[in-house]
Amino acid sequence: MPRNVRIGLIQATTTHPGDTDPLVIKEAMIAKHLAFIEEAAAKGCQVVCLQELFYGPYFCAEQKTHWYSLTEKIPEGPTTQLMCETAKRLGIVLIVPIYEVENTGVYYNTASVIDADGTWLGKYRKTHIPQCLPGFWEKFYFRPGNLGYPVFETRVGRIGVYICYDRHFPEGARCLGLNGAEIVFNPSATVAGLSEYLWKLEQPAHAAANGYFLGAINRVGVEQPWAIGEFYGQSYVVDPRGQMVAMASRDRDELLVTDIDLDLIRTVRDTWQFYRDRRPDSYGAITAP
């Protein structure tokens, strides 16, 4: 019997762009995404992923400490608790990326996975932190993740998370597959220019190499006052063959809805025996200093 799952990906422009009060933006963005989550549930979505740092702008375009006010504890913070209540009320699995505080001055770029009964299952902290291009000053805001590559057993299947810049590193994508992921979500914030051609290249390659579904999410619009470039949307779902099965628009808020059949994973892995034919005994150079 097919294991059909209906996926929803939310891409959105920033509400109140350029506002000097982070908490004003946060309140508006939470309201916007709650409306999208309601729409997703009404359309029969069983799992929904929000974009990277969903309740704010991409503030890493500058280095200012007042953005630290967006941090929350996980899971006890108000946004995670609200999303747990929402997941339970709607019977929907949620992947919720926010700005996490562990201790004062110790902050992470983190995504929670919440099951359809409202249970907080755990979190993934972004592992690879860029500081390589003008407008992407993430090391000012985030410590590198230290939780490995967890996979969470949800009502719809086994879910893993990778976040934005992580997608350039195939090692973690493989770890998610080895840990049993059937669907990997990659919430992102990336602009047109240098890396856009990689957007449709790397993640289909991860899906094909590891035999799982992957949902890639990117915000949209040009965020003021920084205007570091156009967040070009084009959120999409790719299957275990590396084939695109659905893609959102480039330039507008959108809920992308698509159906997948998790049984395709077995079909693909029975054809391409990449896990059987691995040679981890020969890969030591990958982790050498």
Image (spheres, rainbow, N blue to C red):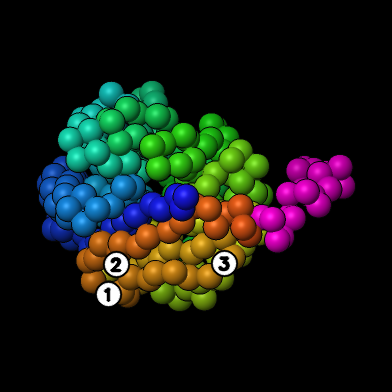
Is residue 212 within the magenta segment? Answer: no
Is residue 211 visible to the viewer in this orientation of the structure?
no
**What residue does disc 2 label?**
220
Where 150 falls versus 67 (above or below)?
Answer: above
Q: Give SS at disc 3.
A: loop
Using the image, tell me which numbered label, if any, was put on residue 242.
3
Residue 44 image offset from top left, x and y in percent = 24, 53
**Gap in Å between the C-alphas at discs 3 and 1?**
24 Å
Residue 283 is a magenta residue: yes
Amino acid type, residue under disc 3 in the picture: Gly
Position in image of residue 26 (x %, y %): 18, 46
Q: Say which quarter of the image contains residue 120.
A: top left
Find disc 1 in the rendering and name its residue: 251
Region in magenta:
269-289
Going by the image, does 85 lie left or right of 120? left
Tell me: residue 125, above or below residue 266: above
